[in-house]
Image (spheres, helix red, strand yellow):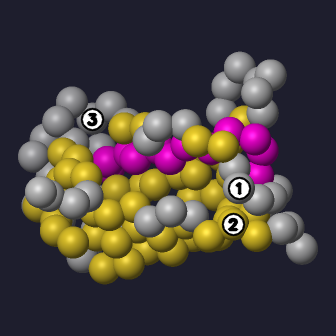
Amino acid sequence: MIVGTTLFKLDGNPYYSPEFPRGGLAGVFVIDVTHVVSTPDVTVTIEHRNAEDTSFATAATFSTISAVGTAIQEATSLKEIIRLKFTFDAGDGALAGLHFVLQAPTWRPYD
């Protein structure tokens, strides 16, 4: 069994995680990158919306991910529904990629 997710740039369209309900008004999101191919520059955006909204808004954005390691981002004032958006840089080749484990968010009340 392989644990985690592997993404390649391919046609350059963003990837989206499944939508999930928030567990608190704020949360800490952690991505453990275990492998990279061709030094990608990946931007991960935490997006949110309420059930009645028709589109997602940006809640927070990770620093660009381009190497093996751990990326951490906090998001506050979260709406009801969350998803993550993974976007490769325009200069990355089609086979630029990364393998990562996305941990469950650590939820907390908003201060």
* Labels 2 and 1 touching (C-beta < 8 A): yes
Q: Quadrant of the N terminus?
A: bottom left
Q: Within 10 Å of the Cα at label 3, are there few (<14), some (14-19), or many (20+) other Cα atoms?
A: some
Q: Earlier in the sequence, mark 2 or mark 3?
A: 3
Is residue 98 visible to the viewer in this orientation of the structure?
Answer: no
* SS assignment for the magenta stretch, majority: strand
Q: Quadrant of residue 74?
A: bottom right
Q: Secondary structure at mark 2?
A: strand
Which residue lies under the disc numbered 2?
Answer: 107
Report x, y in % for residue 27. 68, 65
Task: Give the residues drawn in magenta, as a range.
Answer: 78-89
Q: Which mark is residue 12?
A: 3
- The amino acid pointed to by label 3 is Gly
Which residue lies under the disc numbered 1?
Answer: 23
Residue 75 is a magenta residue? no
Q: Within 10 Å of the Cα at label 1, are there few (<14), some (14-19), or many (20+) other Cα atoms?
A: some
